[in-house]
Amino acid sequence: MDFSISPALLAEMDLFKVFLRKHLKPNLADWYNTGEIPRRFFKLMGIEGWYGFKIKGNQLVKNSALRESLIQEELAKLSPGIAVAVLAHINLGLTGLFLFGSKELQKAYGKAAVNGDILMCLGNSENKAGSDVSGISMRAEKVAGGWQLNGTKAYVTNGFIADLAVITAVSDPTASRNNRMSMYLVDLNSSGVRRTKLNKQVWIPSDLTRLQLKDVFVPDEHLLGEQKRGLQQVLETFTYSRVPISALTLGTAMGAFELALDRAKKREIFGQKIIDFQAKAFEFADFFARIEAARLMLWRACEAMDNGSDFRQESSLAKYLAVQIAREVTPWAADVFGAVSVVFEHPIHKYPMDAWASSLGEGTQDVQKLVIFRELMKKYS
Ligand SMILES: Cc1cc2nc3c(=O)[nH]c(=O)nc-3n(C[C@H](O)[C@H](O)[C@H](O)COP(=O)(O)OP(=O)(O)OC[C@H]3O[C@@H](n4cnc5c(N)ncnc54)[C@H](O)[C@@H]3O)c2cc1C
């Protein structure tokens, strides 16, 4: 088993760090305060090729999961909120188009999304259906030439700024729970779409939006994948996106860890640096060991995805372990800063809240345990 990262990928990551220093770091405080990510940032990410897909012959081609995870971790170290907006665009919206979009749909929208000219998102969760994905009630009724969608998606990252959404809806209410949903590519600039930005304190400056659809027309060609396979398709999309969200979550843990380390090396208390208290040094060692262990699981999931193996269990294991460590390390790191950590604008302040958000996106810890256990039983049956 090879744990090394190729010199070419390392060189790319050096370039990405330069990109972040130039285009993200100087703007971070402003965007955090305004709660908005300008479109030009998404565009620059696309122009420089930092999204997880490229275009070949008008079709989407996936880049390596390891490359994408390294990018997500680096981005999230600075801003988990910006990392999640990128993730919602690429790993939820565009991944839905990649996995289930027809050649024509990929040709029509793939290039513009990869270039950052259009933005995407995915709307599945509703007020009464989060973990229980099959419980959605948004309705898709067949009409001439397409479908008419009615209902509300309660929590959509990028919903306020996106142009296109992958949306799940019940197309056959008489069918069994597993076969009543379909998946659609919805133009969010259509008439009948109403967007309401929610006031939240996690993953700033990404938006979390309620999408209300009233008689929204979706043409037949915008059906993604197969009719009545919406549940299986959205779950497969989450299996894919759990890998980059694990990287995002590790970046959240690592961002807080590095800030705390820097603080502990500089801050003097009782006549010595915080880091010189062995009790604190041991805490750094302990957290570092657990972050590294979670990263190995993430790289194992990347390897399984990249070599075409079944990675359902690996992606849930990676997310479960990443969230566990991020939820522990981030409040501890804030504590290393003392009182200043409660100030909204302080860079350390966001990490504990963002680690909490990570435990909700792409399934809670309980949902990861459901997947891990289901896969475990397949192996031991
Ligand atoms: C910041 C943020 C961004 C989001 N972005 C998106 C997005 O872009 N698109 C989208 O569609 N959704 C999005 N969501 C919604 C998210 O996917 C759901 O919140 C999540 O799936 C949990 O669903 P729920 O909130 O309905 O909680 P519930 O499903 O009601 O869960 C409540 C509690 O019950 C537990 N639980 C659930 N099932 C079981 C079980 N079988 N056994 C034991 N315990 C269980 C859960 O772990 C949790 O603790 C976002 C949420 C947040 C907070």
Image (cartoon, rainbow, N blue to C red):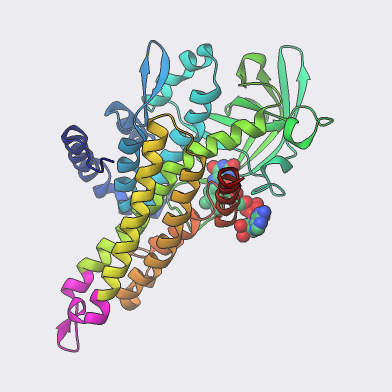
Asked if the stretch drawn in magenta spans residue 97, the answer is: no
In the rendered image, which quarter is residue 334 located in? bottom left
Residue 279 vs 43, above or below: the answer is below
- Residue reaching furthest to the bottom: 270
What is the span of residues highlighted in magenta in the rendered image? 263-281
Picture residue at 51% right of the left edge, 12% below the top: 103
Q: Quadrant of the N terminus?
A: top left
Quadrant for residue 327, please give it: bottom left
Residue 198 seen by the camera:
no
Q: Tell me how many marks there are.
A: 0
**Residue 379 place in picture, x, y as percent:** 55, 44
Q: Quadrant of the C terminus?
A: top right
How far across and down, in percent of the image, does residue 227 sit?
69, 22
Q: Is residue 323 left or right of residue 230?
A: left
Furthest residue in direction front, as rendered: 381
Residue 350, image x, y percentages: 39, 61
The answer to whether residue 124 is left or right of residue 103 is right
Q: Is residue 265 magenta?
A: yes
Identify whether 255 is placed above or below 279. Answer: above
Q: Is residue 249 above or below residue 123?
A: below
In percent of the image, x 47 and y 50: which residue is there?
317
Residue 306 on image: x %, y %: 38, 31
Left or right side of 114 for 158 = right
Please tell me which residue is depicted at 55% across the width and 56% down the height of the picture. 365
Q: Looking at the image, which is closer to me, 241 or 145?
A: 241
The quadrant in which residue 305 appears is: top left
Q: Does 151 sit left or right of 363 as displayed? A: right
